[in-house]
Structure formats: C-alpha cells, structure tokens
Amino acid sequence: MSADREIIVMVDDDITNLNVARNNLAGKYNIVTVPSGEKLFLFLKNITPSLILLDIEMPVMNGYEILRVLKENKITADIPVIFLTARLDPKSEIAGLDLGAVDYITKPFSQELLIKRIELHLLLEKQRRELLTYSYSLESEVDKKTRTVLELQNAIIKIIAELVECRDNITGGHIERTQHYIRLLIDYLLEHNVYTEELSSWDIDLFVMSSQLHDVGKITIRDGILLKPGKLTDDEYEEMKIHTVSGADIIKRIEENTTESEFLSYAAALANSHHEQWSGAGYPNGLKGNDIPLQGRLMALVDVYDALTNDRPYKKAFSHEEAVRIISESSGTHFDPLIADVFLLHEKEFKNTEIIKPKALEQAGDIRTAYKAVHHLLNN
C-alpha cells in the first residue's frame, strides 16, 4: 500500500464486482476487497479505512446489518459508507440513508462516477474532521479564556475582600480560612444528608467564591470603630451592624451593572444575613430559624469559629476547644442546630486543617492607599 493514498474497502460477495472495483480504483487509492461482513470486521481490527463501499445483497450478513454494526462502534461509526447495489427502488435507497450511509450508487457503475462520488465524500469527511478539530480547538480556547476571566474575577474579588478584612494586618487570612471552612462544612452536611436538597441545587464552587464578599460592607465602617481595641459603645455597635446592609447594597449596585446573577445572589444573601441568629436575636432584620437564608446560617458558624480562634483588635485568640464549647452552647440560639451538630461531629477536622495565609496582601505595597482607592470607587 502507498502511504500517501487513502484506503478504500470494497465489501461484496461477488468476486467479479470486487475485481471491477479493484481495477477501477487501484490507480488512485489503496483498494482492499473483502467478500463478507465477517472479513470486513477482521480487517477493521487493525486498520481504519477512509471509506467503505458496501454491497447490500450478501448472504449471512447483508449490507444493512453490517452498517448497523459499524455505527454502533465508536471507532468505525464515522467511516463514510457508500452503498453499491443493483436495487433501483427508492425505499431501499432511503433505508440505507436512514441507517447512516452517505450515498447510494446503483450497479453497474461507471469508473468516472464511482471515483467522483468517492472524491466528494472523502472531501466532505476531511472537511468534517477539520471543522471538528477547529471546533474542539475553539472550545478549548474559549474554556481557557473563561477560566482566565474567572481567575481574574476571583483574584479581584479576593483582593477587595482582603483589603476590607486586613486593614490592620491582624484579621488577614480570614477570607481564605472561612472559604475553606464553609466548603468543609458543606461537604459534611452533604455526607450526613443535611439540607441536601437545597445544597444540591447550588453551584458550590460559585457559592464558596462568593463567600469572600460576606464582609464587604465593612469597607464603609470607620477605622476608629473597626479597629477599636476595646468594647464598642452602643452607638458604635449600631454603626458596626450597618456593614451587613451596606454590603448587600454594594453587591446590589454591582448587580445593576452586570448580567451575572447567581454569584451575586449568593454574595448578597451572605452579606445581609451572616449576623442573623437562629433565635431571632441577630441583625439586621432579626430573622429567625429557617427564615434566615441557608447561606447566612452557614457563614454565621464558620465566621464565629474563625473570629474565636484568631486574634482581633478587641481580644486574643481562643483555643479550638474553647471555640467548640461556645458553638456547642450556642446551638439552637445563635446557630442552626442541624449545622452546629454536623460541625461538632467533625470539629477536629477544622482544628487540624492547615490554611496558608494569603500572600496577595503581604505583597501589596501601601495597603492604606489601596483601601482608600477601593473605598472611593464604591462610594462615588
């Protein structure tokens, strides 16, 4: 066989027809002739031809049956098949085309017609493969660019969130830790079939990404309150509480300028409800029980756990064991009892998880300047 020629297989139980095909095509293609479907399938185990010329009327296994088998195999399904037959009725032609044949040539055929039909379908198959390759390449490029955009979006969101949380370099890492904790918590909830129906309807990756914005409203809070080392006055506490509403408003303003909805829907629910309490004693709306969005109930627990186990301007870090005790005692009052129960079952995994502190802000020159710039953008 010539390496630069297309391979054509002719299947026919009539030796005369095979000889005619071989004589007509041998000068242009690598022509292989086989007398039955069985011989064809043996040949196809080792070589995939460019095209098959298939007789219909054959004993044991006719052309229709052979074509059905070809189409059921992923390796042979796309090989173009041209039926060669003495049948002249339209029903036979339609039956073959319905099964997936690309053409139908009646015997006896001229050499010129056969070659032209073969050339046409080899060209069409080549174009199909090129289009498919282009489509895959385009799809891959689109996926790559989409990932790049998502990575950029996530990086920008992360920087904004960290600028809010790390203004004093004490709470740095809060965003990354709560992201990790909330994913852990969701995994364990699903493992124990808790809130499975609602969680299964979420895009979990998108939700976890959106959790970075749960405290974005703090960007509107004065440093004198946010960084106060002691207890806040009643008036200062009321101003601090506004960060939930401010956060939801900021996200709403973003939403007005984009067609994206799911990510921002998660973010808004988190920002507005993560300080609500199961008993109804939380803020800003005093929601109670299941009236609190599940997003907020999840964030409420991991937010408090992280606040308890890390230094804050107004307190030193508690031990993991003390934080677990407080959460246990607050189950059914501050926290959703079902979520708290799952956390308590897996509390050691939260303690034993090492979380790398984000480097983005460690490398950001003047954090105060960056913060003021973001503050200006969001308030003008």
Image (spheres, grey):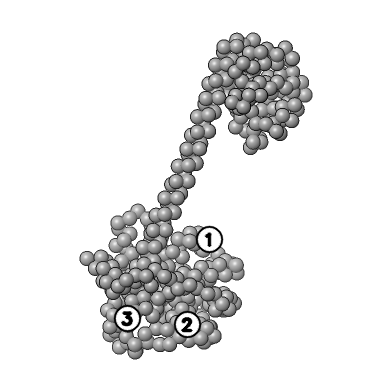
Q: Position of residue 31 (x, y in %)?
A: 66, 21
Residue 288 seen: no
Which residue is identified by label 3? 226
Q: Quadrant of the C terminus?
A: bottom left
Q: Position of residue 218 (x, y in %)?
A: 32, 74
Query: Looking at this view, is 25 or 167 the one in front?
Result: 25
Q: Are marks 1 and 2 in contact (CB under 8 Å)?
A: no
Residue at 60 percent across and 10 percent down: it is 110
Residue 354 seen: yes
Which residue is identified by label 2? 309
Residue at 30 percent across and 58 percent down: it is 256
SS under mark 3: helix
Q: Position of residue 190 (x, y in %)?
A: 57, 66
Q: Are marks 3 and 2 in contact (CB under 8 Å)?
A: no
Residue flagged by tag 3: what amino acid is it?
A: Leu
Query: Looking at this view, is 221 or 268 the one in front?
Result: 221
SS under mark 2: loop
Which residue is identified by label 1? 200
**What is the spatial separation of the Cα atoms under label 3 and label 1, in whole angstroms?**
36 Å
Tell me which numbered mark, 3 or 2, is placed earlier along the sequence.
Answer: 3
**What is the spatial separation of the Cα atoms under label 1 and label 2, in whole angstroms?**
30 Å
**What is the spatial separation of the Cα atoms under label 3 and label 2, in whole angstroms?**
18 Å
- Viewed as shown, does residue 150 lie left or right of 246? right
